[in-house]
Image: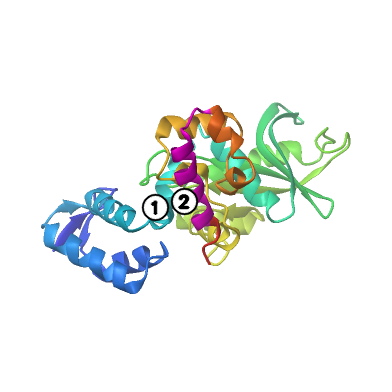
Amino acid sequence: MKVVKFSGDVVDYNPSKLKQTLLKSGASELMVNNVLHTIEKEIYDGIPTKQIYKMAFSLLKKISNSHAARYNLRAALQLLGPAGFFFEKYIARLFEADDYQTKTNLILQGKCVSHEIDVALKKDDIISMVECKFHGGRDANSDVKVPLYILSRFNDLKDKKHPIFSNRDEISKCWIVTNNRFTTDAVGFAICSGMSLLSWDYPLNNNIRTKIDAKHLYPITCLTTLSIAEKDKLLILNVILVKELLNNSECLEKIELSPNRIKNVLKEASELCKYI
């Protein structure tokens, strides 16, 4: 049986790949097998993978909101747009969890021109700049033109003193982060040029997905008990991570949720952040 991917490519239906994705949601093997059995009764030749995803999400949500939330992670990152401003804040949170100091949305003067820096990092007296490449669709990858361009910006900034964490900081490292993927050429050029990359699945064992799971850094946008409008209101209140709700439930009152809905949201948040 053939399925149509987000990119438009037609490939064979792979139930084992879908099973592995479902198991990553935290659902038991029995639950996952039941979901697969239901899906396989509904799918047809040429079905879009997007429709399979929707079916799986709906079935997981009936089992557990937190399972559905974890399954929804990649789509949740896309909800940190449309311009990517909240994605930049989210990436700062990821680095903070690894003991970096961070600052976002800076304008720094280079040798030739000024540059907008998405995130600045400091750790062990090393100052880094981070360029965030946000994509609203799943089929858009960051190709070699991205590190080529970012390298020129880094070179314009690196030998000057900047007012970032102090008044005389020198940028000596450059990161590029995307919510999607890098092409092979982009990875090769970045490695050759000494740039660091972070994407949904790169590096293999320390990527966005593994960082999220390791330290429960789930974005607020993955919660299934909130509407998109309610998530947007929380983002504006600078509530970026699900775990931030657990010590700040008052923000749910600020967006005018009922006591019963607040209870349901906190239950989902607690289950997500306790997942091992």
Residue, x 82% and y 34% (percent of image)? 162
Q: Pointer 1: what residue?
A: 65
Residue, x 30% and y 68% (percent of image)? 31
* Quarter where residue 66 is shown: bottom left
Q: Pointer 2: what residue?
A: 268
Residue 115 location (% of width, % of height): 68, 30
* Quarter where residue 43 is shown: bottom left
> Label 1 crowding class (10 Å Cα cut-off): few <14, some 14-19, many 20+?
many
Residue 265 location (% of width, % of height): 47, 44
**In the shown orientation, is residue 65 left or right of residue 6?**
right
Residues drawn in magenta = 255-272
Is the Cβ of the residue at disc 2 closer than 8 Å to that at disc 1?
Answer: yes
Label 2 to label 1: alpha-carbon separation = 6 Å
Residue type, mark 1 in image: Asn
Residue type, mark 2 in image: Glu
- Quadrant in the picture for the N terminus: bottom left
Residue 200 location (% of width, % of height): 49, 54
Residue 248 inside the magenta-drawn segment: no
> Label 2 crowding class (10 Å Cα cut-off): few <14, some 14-19, many 20+?
some
Q: Between residue 251 and residue 105, name the one nearer to us.
A: 251
Q: What element carries label 1?
A: helix
Q: Between residue 176 and residue 49, name the one nearer to us.
A: 49
Could you say which disc has been placed on residue 156 in the image? none
Residue 180 location (% of width, % of height): 45, 49
Above or below, 63 relative to 32: above
Of pointers 2 and 1, the one earlier in the residue sequence: 1
Whether residue 14 can be seen here? no
Residue, x 63% and y 50% (percent of image)? 94
Predominant SS of the magenta segment? helix
